[in-house]
Image: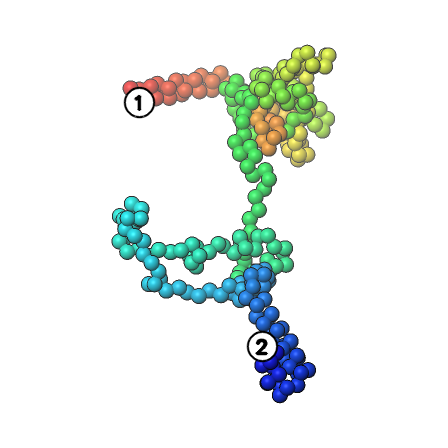
Amino acid sequence: MILRLCQRATAGNTASAFGLTAALGRLALVLYLVNSVVIRRSLACLGYWEAARPHQPKDLSKQRLRHPDKRRKKDNEAKDDVAYKPSHSAEYRLPLSVHFSHLPPIFRVCANERYGKVKVSHKSRHSQNHISMPAYAENRKARFDYEILETYEAGIELLGFEVKAIRSGRIMLTGAFAIPRGPELWLTNASIPAYQPENTPRGYDPERARRLLLHKSEIATLIGKSRTAGLTIVPLRVYSKNRRIKVLLGVARRKKQFDKREKIKKRDMAREAARTLGK
């Protein structure tokens, strides 16, 4: 039928009729593609969001109202005539970061030029791991006998079965301290019993010296402070951080007997006050 109309329009010229028919077909195809989802998504990727999905403000007066029986209590306590807002309205559209997060950086640049900065957040794979750092051992005696001046976080060089023993809570820090050996720091007198005595290598010493892992600047600082008169480096806590065993080191100064008595006195007074308030 379109061909006959084209023949009439071209006064019976068949070649011109075929050319006009092809032109109309191309125009129809272009109009179809412009109206298709693929083209609209492509325009959105290139940053032409409004050309892909034109925003037309809706008349809220024509929207239906909620039935009084279907409202929630919160709505009933508020206004009576609350307009129902469908999920596809402008207020409920997803943010631009959702639409552009999967695109290469060049397309995000195009989107930034048209819509401003599009913030795309990427979750780290370790963000959910070990948010709380479980403590495997606490050196309470060190906090009682010493005044802690500074603290440093250090890694520690361990054997495989020692890691299992620590994770099961078999480690003692009482009497342990760190000493320098050349350009390194070593933890001594920290007792880690064998995890499985039958499978432990012969001659294993639970209190062997273990190398501490820190930055060069931190090692130099701690070595300098360990050689200062009256200062020592003691382990305060052993815990896990990002699936690795960490040791909290403290630069400490030994308390005098008067300081210990004063601390005991304050602790007893606080305990007595709490007991009195509890009654």
Return the x and y of residue 128 as percentages of the image width and height.
55, 37
How many residues crowd mark 2 within 10 Å: few (<14), some (14–19), many (20+)?
Answer: few
- Residue pictured at 31% horizontal, 53% vertical: 66
Residue 44 in view: no
From the viewer's side, name the closer residue of 266 and 247: 247
Up the image or down, 232 lies above or below 74; here it is above
**Which kind of residue does numbered mark 1 sit on?**
Leu
Report which quarter residue 159 is drawn in. Answer: top right
Q: Are marks 2 and 1 in contact (CB under 8 Å)?
A: no
From the viewer's side, name the closer residue of 88 and 207: 88
Report which quarter residue 82 is drawn in. Answer: bottom left
From the viewer's side, name the closer residue of 45 and 209: 45
Return the x and y of residue 265 as percentages of the image width and height.
40, 18
Q: Assign a secondary structure to mark 1.
A: helix
Q: Assign a secondary structure to mark 2.
A: loop
Q: Quadrant of the C terminus?
A: top left
- Residue pictured at 66% horizontal, 79% vertical: 18
Q: CA distance from mark 2 to mark 1?
A: 98 Å
- Residue pictured at 62% horizontal, 29% vertical: 244
Q: Which residue is mark 2?
A: 1
Return the x and y of residue 163 as percentages of the image width and height.
64, 23
From the viewer's side, name the closer residue of 276 and 41: 41
Up the image or down, 206 lies above or below 61; here it is above
Q: Which numbered disc, 2 or 1, marks the residue that appears first in the sequence?
A: 2
How many residues crowd mark 1 within 10 Å: few (<14), some (14–19), many (20+)?
Answer: few
Q: Quadrant of the N terminus?
A: bottom right
Q: Which residue is mark 1?
A: 277
Residue 215 in view: yes
Return the x and y of residue 175 as percentages of the image width and height.
59, 16
